[in-house]
Image (cartoon, coloured by chain):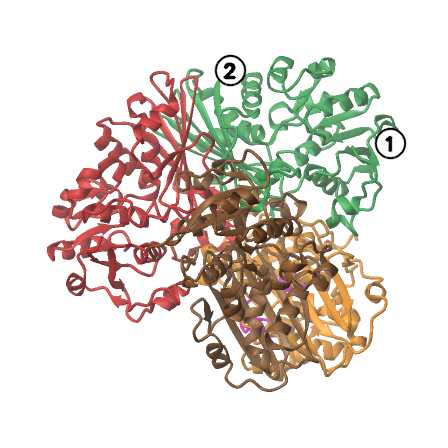
Chain colours: A green, B red, C brown, D orange
Amino acid sequence: LSKTINVAIVGASGYTGLELIKIIEAHPVFKLTYLATSKEDDTLEALHPSLCGVVTMDVEKADATKLAKKADLAFLALPHKTAMGFVKELIALNVKVVDLSADYRLTQAVYEAHYVPHIDPENLEHAVYGLPELFRSKIEDASLVANPGCYPTASLLGLTPFMPYIDQAKHIFIDAKSGVSGAGKKLSDTTHFVTVNDNMFAYNPLGHRHQPEIQEKLLQYANKEVKVHFVPHLVPITRGMLSTIYLEVSQPIDELFKVLEDFYMDEPFVRIRKQPVAMKDVAGTHFCDIYAKYEDGILHIQSAIDNLLRGASSQAVANANLMMGLEESLALPRFAYVP
Amino acid sequence: LSKTINVAIVGASGYTGLELIKIIEAHPVFKLTYLATSKEDDTLEALHPSLCGVVTMDVEKADATKLAKKADLAFLALPHKTAMGFVKELIALNVKVVDLSADYRLTQAVYEAHYVPHIDPENLEHAVYGLPELFRSKIEDASLVANPGCYPTASLLGLTPFMPYIDQAKHIFIDAKSGVSGAGKKLSDTTHFVTVNDNMFAYNPLGHRHQPEIQEKLLQYANKEVKVHFVPHLVPITRGMLSTIYLEVSQPIDELFKVLEDFYMDEPFVRIRKQPVAMKDVAGTHFCDIYAKYEDGILHIQSAIDNLLRGASSQAVANANLMMGLEESLALPRFAYVP
Amino acid sequence: LSKTINVAIVGASGYTGLELIKIIEAHPVFKLTYLATSKEDDTLEALHPSLCGVVTMDVEKADATKLAKKADLAFLALPHKTAMGFVKELIALNVKVVDLSADYRLTQAVYEAHYVPHIDPENLEHAVYGLPELFRSKIEDASLVANPGCYPTASLLGLTPFMPYIDQAKHIFIDAKSGVSGAGKKLSDTTHFVTVNDNMFAYNPLGHRHQPEIQEKLLQYANKEVKVHFVPHLVPITRGMLSTIYLEVSQPIDELFKVLEDFYMDEPFVRIRKQPVAMKDVAGTHFCDIYAKYEDGILHIQSAIDNLLRGASSQAVANANLMMGLEESLALPRFAYVP
Amino acid sequence: LSKTINVAIVGASGYTGLELIKIIEAHPVFKLTYLATSKEDDTLEALHPSLCGVVTMDVEKADATKLAKKADLAFLALPHKTAMGFVKELIALNVKVVDLSADYRLTQAVYEAHYVPHIDPENLEHAVYGLPELFRSKIEDASLVANPGCYPTASLLGLTPFMPYIDQAKHIFIDAKSGVSGAGKKLSDTTHFVTVNDNMFAYNPLGHRHQPEIQEKLLQYANKEVKVHFVPHLVPITRGMLSTIYLEVSQPIDELFKVLEDFYMDEPFVRIRKQPVAMKDVAGTHFCDIYAKYEDGILHIQSAIDNLLRGASSQAVANANLMMGLEESLALPRFAYVP
């Protein structure tokens, strides 16, 4: 571990940017050499007062050429649509990229159906979907990794072990619950404390953009076209995510936990639980906790992650570790924010 | 409205007891003449400091004979299993009863499969399930009403309008979320603030006692045996409940909102929403808010209530109003705890 | 109570506007005949979805002349500074006004030192400070009442009984805590759920505008110039306010509770507590709960109110009741949002 | 840092026990070789499910002799009163002890006035109060360190820099706010979610046991007998603590921040803030954030810590580091639980 690899973060002002800074500061190999936002004149202390006395670093206005001189790999925590312009430049400059936006997660047709016309189809074609448990070897060879969405991460890790049992004709229902940090720092009525506190509600039911992401990756991973129906909810919690999945399976599942345990045998960051999972047991960590129950033809799966870590920033670091030939687990947080 | 009807509450110490006191105090006809708990020496101010300066009344140790001398109708907010002993006595003394426990909600066989042997099967046979929108005329004639559980109330009001579209061979999935007051005042690790805050988790997945209640009442109401799968969750909220329902339907539903609006045309306490429902819009009220969406053979229903009011105490008062020949809506709370 | 008095609300979109609507809807004499905001095209259901099925009413763009034709008294829930323009018009049109802004609370000099130049000094001179327990008889004769701030209401009700014991040379420290609804519906970093949840912090320490309001009213009421130091805090709670007061007194206070009980003997909406007060016991009500402790020359007072009700809207209705010759307590909410 | 020092934790089941485990697991020198509770048959996974897959270790029933064979230093996270029996045994067995209870914090007379008769006065006499910023050199030489209470830690770090300005005749008022984890895991009405959520209240006003601790340590540190009045509050937050201090000072303080900055010049874990401090910026860390304001003879100080870390477990590790001749900052957490 004697060598040092220089890395950059673009998009330092948001929640996932902050989490990236925290993880990289504690990383034994990565060294943060470039930190940028899309605006002028930001300072780290103003953006994140909690980092005062911990991390001292200049924040620059994002510039691909400058970045390329200072870092070998860049984490992009930029909004969807604006990310792809920047990625294109960085890849051309031979910088490896982990992109936390949605811009490289989907095939071009699906992306354009749900977002906007894609301006970087060449790189899109070679981008690898960064869910290590499912696509590890491809990530190791990638120079551009599309970091998965938080909802797809939780849902895919819960569903994939059971793909052999899933009948393509049947429907998969995912009832997902997310903490408010998933909505980002941007101000809106929906994230006002008075709106959220003592409240709970669904949004974009059956129409959320993460639904095609889940469906497409299941197809890609298991070569099976399944029907996913997805309804996300906002809960009065800062961080954490729970995906609850319901489906009818095509054959009885006798040894439910064995299916899970065999599938995740060599995965230290997926924990198979014998009791219903709790958001708080994973908040602050890279863990995905999974619980399942089978009864009379029905399979019920629960999958919990920290939406900002396993659902964004720690997964980005896991991907970067793999891309740079390091041990995947380096610096991934394991101690939950409990109590 | 010149007459007065004397009513009693047994079980004054819990959350539903408190809500009953509040509603009856504002009731134009009911007069609270007897208030009891199962213990000696309780005082109302010690039990509920918020009632200081609002309600002054002695709290007695529950005694059926004394109650029968003072009141024509009793609300029982006692634990499951202990309620039925008391109901038996009261019915024998010609007191009408609204029982908030589970003791008279189910047929004997189903009750005994999920709870304990029933000690009052005669009255059980004549008890009426107190969901006014579904069983109003029977409630009007009843001397014993079993007040529905909170989860069944929300789920049944969401599902029944769509029963004509439901295929008995298909599965109905109910993902329910409840505020912590639903767990009652009793101390447990599960209700400790530190356990619940910033957390969310399921409990009794696919095994909760409210599942047979929902199934049995759908059969009773619509004469259709359906397969319900039910998973409740605890959310860091004091009061409120959201039932999210997923199912495949047997025929396309063209005019989704018309189905709902026709079904609830004359029901002032069911609101059909064009946007996803929010727990907070019903907290503090007797309203049930319903939203639905249909897509490609899939029906998704959301139903929100206040677990302590529509899910317990205000529904009990609605039932009592009907049993005493009054207008159902008397004193039912309509102003939500918003903001 | 056979007569009806027509009233108007200007500023229907905010939290205090909503609370006014709720109280007036339940009022036996007041009839809401005019509802306005400062914008075009608002509808009540869009502004406050929780009122759907409860209150049906057009929302107009505020116009003093139209209002004057429809109502005898107006509640103004407008921002500071914009309120005074509207008040001036309404008073000229012989409409009585309860103004919930700060515009008529202070003497001109003090107002202008903390806010902006006053554009309506004539009416300011005759405005009465609407804290009924202290200035009831003046309110009865007023045509313009300045509704007190929430912090001053809690602090003044706690302090005034002890004014005889207060030494002008000594300092009074008020450590106040407010729920987030006090900051209003406006979006800001400070009211983002993620900022507030699991957090607590002071704002404007020793520099908040409510400090001169408290000081001036103590002088006006007790003819004593005292030194008040005031630090407000935001707590992760929707509604509720707690003022904790510390001071050295000039003489021992032997019968602390007697001082309070004598002072508030005839006041049904001030409750003297023998245990520390709790925000939740008053949330949803017009009550002010007070607790005090004396030890070795030190007086410690706690005063709790609902910031939106006793600190704004229910106090406004109490004032309107008095101004219109009605019983002060009409329609004032007494049942707390407990649990 | 090549050597390893074996340490033990007694009292593994509570919140501070969990925090100790987490810190020590990440410690470069300390190795956890003995973990115990006061009961039989506990397992780490059952006590703390979040540690599953992170820490694997047997939990024993506490036994001083066994402990002494396995560890050179013990952290005791036992209840007040029961700790001192265990400390006595361990000291006799030459084990160094950091005791997180109150048993060795006070002089015997003061302890016995507020708690119970002390059974280990010999060790009490030599115990050192473990607030490193104030008593570092004594801690380095101690074999028994009494870890400070959370309220005294926050209050003392805020007050001590200003001791030269404090007039003994004047009163110091401390209004403190604590997250619920400070009350421990024990079940009580006070910690029930429904009691705490949307609520805030004081407890033990002017009578809390931390008041003499603050007073005594100020005397010990600054040789000045001052009058402290202390009122703690519970806030609906899991972890975090804010001490707000008010006092009249004897002389003007011209350069307020310079006083603080000079005092804490060499202290990396005290941060002087130019804006009011926020609980969340220190939650998860060993930092104490301090803000102050001076105005017209009045000094106002705010001091924020994580009650479980700087107020308990990370301070215990800081003390252990000093006692074992290590660098004080080893393994002390610096990244806050933000967002």
Helix, strand, or loop for circle 1? helix
User: Is residue D66 visible in the rendered structure shown here?
Assistant: no
Sort mark 1 into few (<14), some (14-19) or many (20+) by Cα contacts within 10 Å.
Answer: some
Q: Can you tell which quarter of the image residue A184 is in?
A: top right
| Chain of the residue under label 1 | A
Disc on the earlier residue, 1 or 2: 1
Residue D23 x/y as whole percent: 67, 53
- Residue range (magenta): D69-88
* Residue that badge 1 annotates: A70
Q: Nearer the viewer, residue A73 or D188?
A: D188
- What residue is shown at x 52% (from left), y 62% (from top)? C305
Q: Nearer the viewer, residue A293 or A283?
A: A283
Residue C292 x/y as whole percent: 53, 75
Residue A327 x/y as whole percent: 71, 33
* Residue that badge 2 annotates: A224
Helix, strand, or loop for circle 2? loop
Q: Can you tell which quarter of the image residue C116 is in?
A: bottom right
